[in-house]
Amino acid sequence: MTEFQLTYHDLYSDLLDWGGSAADSSRARNIKRACKTAVRNLAMEHRWSYYRKIGRITTSTSYSTGTIEYTDSTRVMTLTGGTWPTWAASGFVRINNIDYPVYSRDSDTELTISVDANPSGNVSSGTAYAIYRSVYSMPTDFLSSSDFENFDNAFSAKYIAPGDLQKAMYSREAGSEPRFYTFIGDPDYIGGMAVKFYPAPGATAYNYDFVYMRHPANLNLLEYKTGTVSVAGGSTTVTGYSNTAWTSDMVGCVIRFTTESDYPDGPTGDNPAVEERIITAVADANTLTIDSAVENTYSQKKYRISSLVDIEPATMQTAVELGAERELASITRSDRIGQIDAVYRDAVIRAKEADHRHIGTSSGGRMADPNSLTDWRSGSDY
């Protein structure tokens, strides 16, 4: 029996019904905005177990092979007798105990140094140097994390605020196991986050493990239903007909199948789907792969593809549905916003209570507090 997941189209349709009127272009935009905002806001209400992931960052070793020459007029640093590491654009070059951030890696032998911090004068050829990397991109879905623990020796680096880490850097240490870390905007990816270590790792590479909170996947696709599909019972390959134009952006979306003449809906729609699956790959415009084989055979039948609402249905679905109603009421300036918000808040409380996962004893032999999500190792809520 198929377990149906909540899709973007389901959430949109629910709001359309809730409002009680047809969706003109303005109302359609408001409903889409409400759906997306509701998912983002619910994710921020609590450190949901569902959004916890394990991450690891392996640091890069320092490099000092060869010698350098720096030309101030072009800010180009040229390496002789070596090859700049592939990560050099995320590093800094140390010359005579002074650090110069790299702006770009232009080739195996040339770097451009930052305009804000450079030698401010030519550096003659044959100069010794070392290049270190202290900044590493966090996962693209990163929100927050627990402590960074060295996998090899169980030493935990200490989190400090960005300003405090900047002050620590005045001691100009480099080339040892990091003692501190902080989070900053990723200098290489707009909208991303990065971790910055101090001191920068030297000749040894370290493996840091951490538990982090991710953000939910975006709701990108409301629906796609052009053409028809065929798939044999027991197969995971779906073939499209009549001008399907499937793309890789559909990976992770839900595809629903029906034996009826209309497009398949969710379980509360007028034409509930017979089955649904998750798209795992799109080979071309009319061939895709699903996560598990269908039970029935569908021969050139209508279908619907929509983004999966990235929640755990058992605990979070009611809250996100009510949250979407609240957001739409706020956008449309409904005079019932206070009442709607109160209902949403009650649903969030119930969802949080349902997210208490551990009801046995703790590692110390005492009963775990069912109202606590504290990690026993670090005292953090991870």
Image (spheres, rainbow, N blue to C red):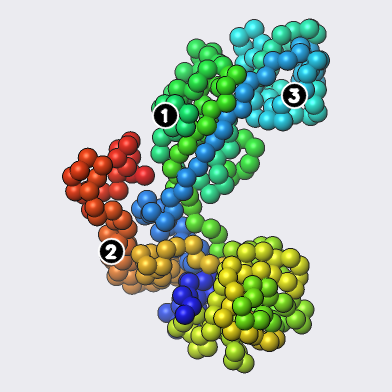
Residue 84: image tag: 3
| Residue mark closest to the camera, 1 vs 3 | 1
Q: CA distance from mark 2 to mark 1?
A: 37 Å
Name which of mark 2 and mark 1 comes first in the sequence: 1
Q: Amino acid at mark 3?
A: Trp
Q: Secondary structure at mark 1?
A: loop
**279 left or right, relative to 333:** right
Q: x, y percentage for residue 238?
A: 68, 75
Density class for disc 2 (Cα within 10 Å; few <14, some 14-19, many ≥20) is: some
Say whether residue 194 is visible.
no
Q: Nearer the viewer, residue 109 or 46?
A: 109
The residue most toward the bottom is 261
Density class for disc 1 (Cα within 10 Å; few <14, some 14-19, many ≥20) is: few
- Quarter of the image where one finds residue 254: bottom right
Residue drawn where x is 81% and y is 15% of the image: 80
Residue 61: image tag: none
Q: Amino acid at mark 2?
A: Arg
Q: Secondary structure at mark 2?
A: helix
Q: Quadrant of the C terminus?
A: top left
Residue marked by disc 1? 154
Residue marked by disc 2? 350
Q: x, y percentage for residue 237?
A: 68, 73
Q: Secondary structure at mark 3?
A: loop
